[in-house]
Image (cartoon, helix red, strand yellow):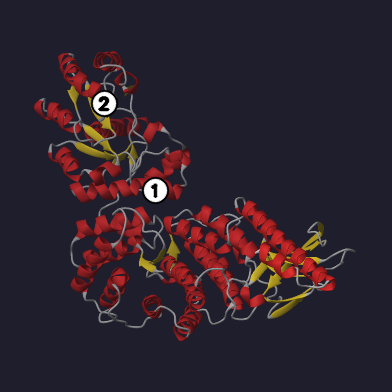
Amino acid sequence: MFQRLKKYKQGFNCKTNRCLNSAIKMMLCIIFVIVVQNGRADEAGSSAVPSPFTLAVRAAGELDKGHFHNSLGHIKLALQSSPDSATLHILAGSLLLNTGDAKSAKRAFENALLCDYSDALAHYGLGLAQLAAGHRIPALVSLTNSEKNGGDAAYILIARRYTQWLDGAQISIGGAGLPVSFACAQNALNAMSAFRLNKLKETSVLLKRVDEDLPGESLGQTSGLLITFDQSRSIISAAAPMLQSSVLSEKIVSRSGLNGDIVFSPDNVVKGTSYATYEMEGQTLSLTNSPPFQVVWDSRQMSNGLHNLTVVLYSQSGVELSRASRRIRIFNPGGRSLNCTQEELEQLRSNIWETLSLKPDRGAIAYIRGLVCRSLGDKPEAATCFAEACALHPDFVDSRSKLASAGGLNSGEEALWGGLNTENVVALTFDDGPKPGLTEPLLQILTDQKIPATFFVIGRHVTEYPELTKKISDAGMEIANHSYTHPNLTKLSLSEAAAELMRTQTAIARVTGKFPRYMRPPGGNWNKSLASLVKYWGLTACMWSVDAYGAEVVSAQQVADTVLSQVHPGSIILMHNGKMSTIQALPTVISELKRRGYKFATVSELERRVKANQNLLRQVSIPILGRSE
């Protein structure tokens, strides 16, 4: 290219040659500046903050996985760059609603509507936030607005029918032809309509189908936004509210900003300036060599929000003379809120719709199933359902009193530490089972020797191995509660500790048909608050007087020596259903205790003997007190 230019140059006069030289210099400078700017942009790109769209995609993914704090961080960062993005405010509202902060969620969706009042997803989210706050009429208005603006019909239908049901309307969506993913909510709504008409068998069938179709563990709470069929708290979330999350819903003060065609010019033109470049977010927008170095730029090329504008002045030889940056805000009505393709935006918003879908609350479904079973005369099943409701929501409506009336709540008493010290009777207890490969041989030894024992089982093991749990019960052993996941119960909130206990009660009752009377705190961690909670839920704590755990991790001989050296009349012996050393030591322990004249009892039998002795002492003391008077 340069050779051709040189050839053409020979036929020009001097004046023409000077013009050509200037043109070549200008072209070279332009090329130089563009290369330099692109190089800077590449360098900045390696350490630059991700784009608001990228952050939004990450936030939606973290929200879907239940990583709420990670999602919060991404949304906060994205909103700093694009405060006028309706989609980002909707995402913030979804996060807030999914963590139980309906008030802040409402403000976030209102912010989204300030950015774009025609946004159907924002209207839908606002309707859910209003419903969660107990404002059903405004919620119906918002859902209608969502529909008018082209919102997803399936999501809107479920939310509208639920709102109408809460208002007392008789509804049915049996023939709505909804996608399969909405079947669970659809069946729940139809079940509740049937329940209102006292169609109990139909209700029972539908609710059982809902329970089977709900995702996740059968005794675990469903994630997301949950419908409870309870007017006092119609939409809830299993997740706890987050600290400092309300920053996502700070009200938008103004939507004003630059829009349309904008004239840019340097604040101060340095002497010797020949060229000026304008950069936006590190990318060159325009280059001019005409004083006063103004450019007209179409702001509709950029997404709405805050952007960094940099003006750089150069000499004729391409030397940078000055650089100035400023923060500008672009707001074009109807403009792009995120710098992405329409297809990418639609996928992101589809994911956000999913985070705002309504699902039946498993605890509420269990409670209603309990009411139906009680009405149909199935008291044991009703008790199990009410226990499940208590496990998932310890304070749900009156589920505890319903559990008591159905026979699923015992009378909790003070902790039991041992039996009578005047009788050669001991209780063998085994913690942590059931465990395949270890429970069977342990159980075989006990049944062969005709020894009753008490198994303190972990609830999640019961759920995982129901047949093995039933085998323990069928062998005549007593089954007791050792929490659901084996945590330190004193480190949990009272609600969390109650859930640990009641999930285990429910799991055991489902398998054996019986509600345990005793519980043992994992690790022996115990305090007054936990003691009161245990009694409140109809359980009696069973501690121990002989602990073989330290020996179990050494050898079978050590286990036998430890138990036999510490045992005494009335002992409760703590061992574990998880150590081979225990299984190997058990025949020796049983044989030697029998030789010493000891008998074996379950914890229930041990306590029964204690109470019988106490009653006997009271009866003997009554006439003595009468004579002294």
Residue located beneath label 1 in the image:
498
Q: In this view, does 217 lie above or below 539?
A: below
Q: In this view, does 18 lie to the left or right of 340?
A: right
Q: Is residue 509 left or right of residue 31?
A: left
Give how far across and how far down residue 406 sits, in percent: 25, 57
Give how far across and how far down residue 1 sits, in percent: 65, 64
Q: Is mark 2 on a helix, strand or loop?
A: loop
**What residue occupies the far front of the structure in this picture?**
11
**How crowded is the residue under tag 1: few (<14 C-alpha within 10 Å), some, or many (20+)?**
many
- Disc 2 marks a residue whose amino acid type is Lys
Give how far across and how far down residue 433 sits, in percent: 25, 35
Q: Can residue 515 be seen in this view?
A: no
**How crowded is the residue under tag 2: few (<14 C-alpha within 10 Å), some, or many (20+)?**
some
Mark 2 or mark 1, which is nearer to you?
2
Mark seen at residue 579: 2
Residue under the image location 43 percent in, 43 percent down = 532
Q: In this view, does 541 lie to the left or right of 97?
A: left
> Between disc 2 and disc 1, whose residue precedes?
1
Measured in 3D between alpha carbons, the distance from the residue under mark 2 to the one under mark 1, in whole angstroms, is: 29 Å
Give how far across and how far down residue 208 sits, in percent: 23, 64
Q: In this view, does 228 lie to the left or right of 9?
A: left
Q: What element carries label 1?
A: helix
Foreground pick, 607 / 228: 228
Residue under the image location 30 percent in, 55 percent down = 388
Q: In this view, does 274 lie above or below 199?
A: above
Quadrant location of residue 401? bottom left
